[in-house]
Image: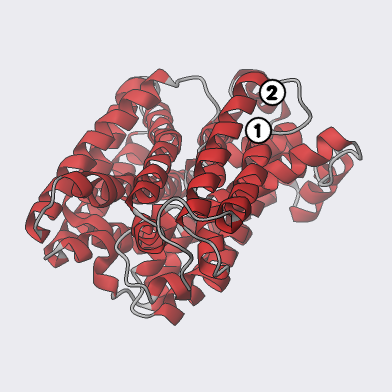
């Protein structure tokens, strides 16, 4: 264990060093927010891949698969990977050519400031659960590695401090360079561990056949209205709700050209889909290698199945690679998702009320990064006991109902206007919140109702006589 802790500690030192080195490239707000729009193709792939390959991919998704099968993970990895592919195909080039600093800037340019502020607040709120999930996972990892010497809450604070250290100074440059280093660790580590665990479980064919017999590959929902609507809502929540997110936007917009950003998003999303199944395979292999351990943790904390398997059943080299890969996955996601809402707050909310020079903007963003890190750590501490997968999945509902329709309709429907956008945002958010509060017995999932009302609001508001904001623009 001491050897394992030493190697993991060395890995953390290297990650911090890379992040601090990246800070030397930050000269202005553009460098901090989108790495000066200068990243090459291979780094864009790494940053896009790292968007969601975090705690939910290594801990949350495998746990959900063991409990619910493929049908339970429709949001992630299926929805998440499709989001990145769709963003690359239909959004990346159009948004890149607008030369925006944040996704919130789009809503100001296409509509007006009230739409920008409302949507930006929705985007920022959505990150609370997402970043908190990464902080929670860091707490779990430090607790496991220290054999309970470090409590989970203390591990959360330590983990948040490490991620804050290099993100604070280097911004998107730190995110990009550490993502590239961490992606190498993730891919190499997980492939090697899959090779080791596969031999212990009797081979890939044995694991896959056992999962099929257990009904884990059942994907389609039961043929009832309620199940079909729930399945559709789960699919669109992350697939569409993730598209108007600042972290996806900033990773793709950091590319050196529109084509590089679009291609990087498509390739990164495809790689994410493929590699997300390795932790699933490892977790299910655990049910063959140590069925008693799996049965016990399924009733206690299914997220601990994979770490427990690694600590108890594989050699030290595999343990070092696994926990290195796990920390890589969590930290790469945490850094980007810590930076994204902080930039949005500064650029699209604070700057609207307090005009700033570029230098003041950079300082204000760093202050907001610190404040947001403290806020999500407190939120994570207050949310202990919640599923990491659930925390991440719920994060996208607010952007699905409040931000997606104004984005896609603004890009692809020339008649969409400010009045339509306000109808879409307000209608989507209010109907979703009302359904969450009073529609628990309905067969209609609240976020699906919010999405449909948002779409109807855009159509009706844009076609009605124009009373609010500016008229339709091409």
Q: Is residue 58 visible?
A: no
Task: Decide: is 459 above or below 423.
Answer: below
- Per the image, label 1 sits on a secondary structure element best described as helix
**Which quadrant of the view contains residue 350?**
top left
Front in this rendered view, residue 435 or 201: 435
- State the image coordinates of residue 40 (x, y, percent, origin top left): 35, 77
Mark 1–mark 2 CB contact (< 8 Å): yes
Q: Which residue is mark 2?
A: 439
Q: Which residue is mark 1?
A: 446
Name the spot of residue 370 as percent of width and height, x first: 20, 38
Q: For residue 116, say whether it is visible.
A: yes
- The residue depicted at 22 percent of the width and 58 percent of the height is 18
Which residue: 51% across, 39% down? 426
Q: CA distance from mark 1 to mark 2?
A: 7 Å
Where is 414 relative to 6, above or below? below
Q: Nearer the viewer, residue 111 or 10?
A: 111
Which percent across, then down, holds residue 198? 68, 51
The residue under the point 44% across, 49% down is: 329
Q: Nearer the viewer, residue 8 or 444?
A: 444
Q: Residue furthest right?
A: 223
The 10 Å Cα crowd at callout 1, few under 14, some 14 to 19, many 20 or more, is many
């Amino acid at each position: 264990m001491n050897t394992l802790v030493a190697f993991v500690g060395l890995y953390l030192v290297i990650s911090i060093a890379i992040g601090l080195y990246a800070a030397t490239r930050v000269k202005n707000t553009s460098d901090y927010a989108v790495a000066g729009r200068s990243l090459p193709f291979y780094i864009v792939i790494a940053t896009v891949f790292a968007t969601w390959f975090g705690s939910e991919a290594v801990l949350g998704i495998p746990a959900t698969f063991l409990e619910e099968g493929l049908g339970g993970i429709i949001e992630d990895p299926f929805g998440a990977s499709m989001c990145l592919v769709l963003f690359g195909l239909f959004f990346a080039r159009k948004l890149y050519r607008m030369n925006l600093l944040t996704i919130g800037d789009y809503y100001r340019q296409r509509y007006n400031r009230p739409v920008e502020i409302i949507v930006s607040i929705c985007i920022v709120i959505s990150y609370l659960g997402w970043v908190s999930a990464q902080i929670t996972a860091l707490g779990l990892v430090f607790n496991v590695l220290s054999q309970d010497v470090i409590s989970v809450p203390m591990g959360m604070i330590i983990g948040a401090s490490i991620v804050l250290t290099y993100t604070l100074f280097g911004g998107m440059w730190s995110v990009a360079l550490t993502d590239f280093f961490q992606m190498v660790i993730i891919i190499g580590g997980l492939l090697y561990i899959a090779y080791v665990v596969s031999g212990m479980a009797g081979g890939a064919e044995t694991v896959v056949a056992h999962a099929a017999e257990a009904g884990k590959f059942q994907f389609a929902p039961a043929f009832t209205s309620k199940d079909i609507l729930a399945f559709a809502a789960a699919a669109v929540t992350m697939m569409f709700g993730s598209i108007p997110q600042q972290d996806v936007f900033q990773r793709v917009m950091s590319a050196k050209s529109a084509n590089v950003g679009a291609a990087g998003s498509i390739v990164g999303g495809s790689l994410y889909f493929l590699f997300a199944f390795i932790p699933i395979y490892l977790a299910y292999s655990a049910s063959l290698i140590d069925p008693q351990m799996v049965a016990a943790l399924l009733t206690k904390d299914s997220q601990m199945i994979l770490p427990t398997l690694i600590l108890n059943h594989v050699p030290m080299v595999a343990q070092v690679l696994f926990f290195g890969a796990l920390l890589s996955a969590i930290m790469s996601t945490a850094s980007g998702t810590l930076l994204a809402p902080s930039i949005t707050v500064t650029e699209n909310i604070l700057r609207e009320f307090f005009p700033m020079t570029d230098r003041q903007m950079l300082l204000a963003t760093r202050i907001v990064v610190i404040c947001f890190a403290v806020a999500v750590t407190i939120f994570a501490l207050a949310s202990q006991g919640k599923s990491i997968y659930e925390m991440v999945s719920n994060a996208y509902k607010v952007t699905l109902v409040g931000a997606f329709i104004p984005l896609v309709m603004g890009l692809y429907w020339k008649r969409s206007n400010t009045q339509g956008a306000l109808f879409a945002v307000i209608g989507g958010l209010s109907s979703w919140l009302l359904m969450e509060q009073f529609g628990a017995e309905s067969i209609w999932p609240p976020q699906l109702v919010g999405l449909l009302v948002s779409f109807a609001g855009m159509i009706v508001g844009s076609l009605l006589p124009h009373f609010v904001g500016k008229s339709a623009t091409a």
